[in-house]
Image (spheres, grey):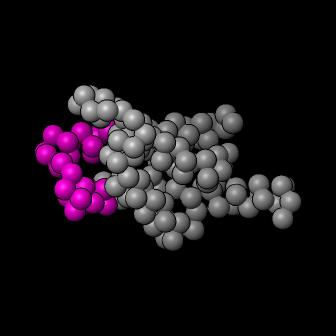
Amino acid sequence: MDVIEQTARQRRLAAPGYPLPPWAGFLLDMGLILVFAAIGRGTHAEPVNPLGVFGTAWPFMVGTAFGWALVWRIRKIAPLNANDGVLVWLATFAVGMPLRVITGAGTAVPFVLVTMVATAILLLGWRFVADQVVTRGRY
C-alpha cells in the first residue's frame, strides 16, 4: 500500500471531514491522560517522574483505549468528534476508577469529581475545537 492509499484509508476510518488521522487522535488522548496524571501528582506534592505519572495514569489510559475500541466497534470510525468523544470520556472514567479501586489506589469523592471534570475537559475539549474547525472548513 503506497502513501496515498494509506492516507486515503486513514481518512475513511476517521470521522468524515476530519484532517486528523486516527493514530494522532489516539496519541493525543493518551498524552492528555498523562498530562492529567502529572498535574495531579504535582498538585499533591507527589514525585512527577515517568514511573509515578504512568502509575497514576495507566487505569485511565486503559479506559481510554477501551472507549476507542468501543466506538470503533460500534461506528466503524475513529472517535475524533465530540459526540464520539463522549463515549471515550465515559469509558475512561468508568474503566479507570474501578481499576484504581482494584489496585488499592485512592478514590476519594473529591478525586472522583476532579477526575470527571478534568478528563471531560481534556478529552472533549480538543474534539470540540476540531469540530468547530471542520464545521467552518478551516483546515
Residue drawn where x is 53% and y is 43% of the image: 28
Where in the figure is residue 91, as x and y percent of width and height? 36, 59
Residue 61 drawn at (x, y percent): 41, 53
Q: Which portion, as a residue range, is magenta?
A: 95-121
Is the stretch drawn in magenta largely helix, strand or loop?
helix
Residue extending farthest left: 109
Which residue sits at x=48%, y=46%? Answer: 29
Q: Answer with left or right where residue 29 lies relative to residue 117.
A: right
Towards the viewer: 37 or 81: 37
Q: Residue at x 56, y 58 (%)?
A: 78
Q: In which quarter of the image is the N terminus?
A: bottom right
User: Where does residue 88 sit, x and y in percent of width and height?
Assistant: 42, 56
Left or right, 94 with respect to 34, comes to left
Vertical order, 53 against 39 (above or below): below
The residue shown at (62%, 41%) is 134
The image position of residue 8, as x and y in percent, is 77, 57
Decide if residue 128 is in sight here.
Answer: no
Q: How many callouts does the rendering have? A: 0
In the foreground, 128 or 9: 9
Residue 71 is inside the magenta segment: no
Find out whether residue 114 is within the magenta segment.
yes
Q: In this view, does 62 lie above or below 121?
A: below
As drawn, the residue found furthest toward the bottom would be 73
- Can you say which quadrant of the picture contains the C terminus? top right
Q: In this view, does 65 lie to the left or right of 98?
A: right
Residue 93 in view here: yes
